[in-house]
Amino acid sequence: MGIVPISAITGEGVPDLLMILVGLAQRFLKDNLQLTATGPGVGTILEVKEEKGLGTTLDVILYNGEFFAGDTVIVGTSREPLVTKIRALLKPKPLAEIRSEERFLPVKHVSAASGVKVSAPKLDNALAGSTIRVVSNPDEVEALSLELKSELDAVRIDTENEGLIIKSDTIGSLEALVGELKARDIHIHYADVGPISRRDVIRAAAINDPLLSAILGFNVDILPDALNEIQKTNVPVFSSDIIYTIIESYERWVEDQKNKMEQERLEAVIRPGAVRILPDCVFRQSKPAVVGVQVIGGIVRTQVNLMREDGANVGVIKGIQAHNENQGSATVGQEVAISIDGPTVGRQIHEGDILYVNIPEKHARIVELELKPKLAEDEREVLENFLEIKRKKDPFWEGRI
């Protein structure tokens, strides 16, 4: 096995590598290298780009046959195959790269294998990575269109009902991006070549899974109407000219979203809390009962149920007030007034009673299994007392015996 030191920055070793590849191809692929330099030309579209004074042009590698200025050609597009006529064939100046911005020299004829810039009408939807082929006989148009369409269908990406929206500049880069995503078991809903459009944003916004409601774009522009739709829907777009940068950015976003969702889930959990009704602090006996309490452990919030020490449900906290100001919660040590919808003071509740937040079974399981190590000492004590009360009445409550 040969080793060729190369540098993508300085270009060192690249000619040596190419020379070795050519030598290996000539040695081991001799039977496959049957180049035809005459006949109808067939090439691959490398890039679709605007050239000043020429409009949309194609950078093409002609790998078989020949092109003449004026030839009728069929071109792969993002829609149906396009039949058009070559307006001009352009070659770069000597020693100039085909992708450079320097002026090109017009030629009448090119033959395989060579690179050439093709100027022709109606190339706006031409698809980089697809085929351009000379039509030598008008009767061949239908058959060549079907052949070209089948080639494009063969590279269509298998998609799923729920997944990401993927856009890329060429078929080859699209396949590379999709391959990397599938290797990471990331689902894809729609994949196509071209700029990110408003329709792509609407598609992404309609995905039910919030972690898949996103767009990944490789080396593509975002159309103005798509930018407006992104602002409305807040669909995240991850775009770069490096595939791994796109994927890493998306994976970091997914991790952040998971952490945020987990935090929101835990914050929604009803936590342990207990209050003692203070003596001589009954401000209203019922409908709702308004009493002064001291929070003796944990936290109490509005809209949570309270229960007595015998396990009987008391009612719902409708409001909490401290220093004549409403607040959503109260923590250990605070003395506040609470209004309770349900009980009557002197019947269901009395001065000096200890009332516990009646945690639903599902929430209690999360608190005990996930939050308990993070609870303060007073919260853990309230939780233990609460669970003991519940399990006296039902040994199987919250999955325990």
Image (spheres, rainbow, N blue to C red):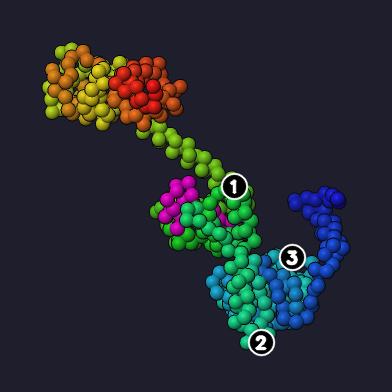
First of labels 1, 3 by sequence position: 3
Residue pictured at 43% horizontal, 23% vertical: 372
Left or right for 260, reference 9: left
Residue pictured at 75% horizontal, 72% vertical: 63
Q: Which mark is residue 137?
A: 2
Decide if residue 196 is in sight here.
yes
- Which amino acid, mark 1? Arg
Left or right for 48, reference 344: right
Decide if residue 283 is in sight here.
no
Mark 2 or 1: in front is: 1
Is residue 352 within the magenta segment? no
Q: Which residue is mark 1?
A: 184
First of labels 2, 3 by sequence position: 3
Q: Residues within 10 Å of mark 2 (few under 14, many from 20)?
A: few
Q: Where residue 244 appears, x then y in whole percent?
A: 62, 48
Asked if residue 289 is positioned above or below residue 185 in the image, the reply reads above
Q: Secondary structure at mark 1?
A: loop
Q: Secondary structure at mark 3?
A: loop
- Residue range highlighted in magenta: 203-222
Asked if residue 91 is positioned above or below residue 346 in the image, the reply reads below
Distance in Å between CA atoms under marks 2 and 1? 47 Å
- Which amino acid, mark 3? Glu
User: If the image is split into quadrants, where does the C terminus sit?
Assistant: top left
- Which amino acid, mark 2? Asn
Residue pictured at 70% horizontal, 77% vertical: 89
Q: Residues within 10 Å of mark 1 (few under 14, many from 20)?
A: few
- Where, by quadrant of the figure, is residue 315 drawn? top left
Q: Where residue 332 appears, x then y in whole percent?
A: 32, 18
Q: Which residue is mark 3?
A: 97
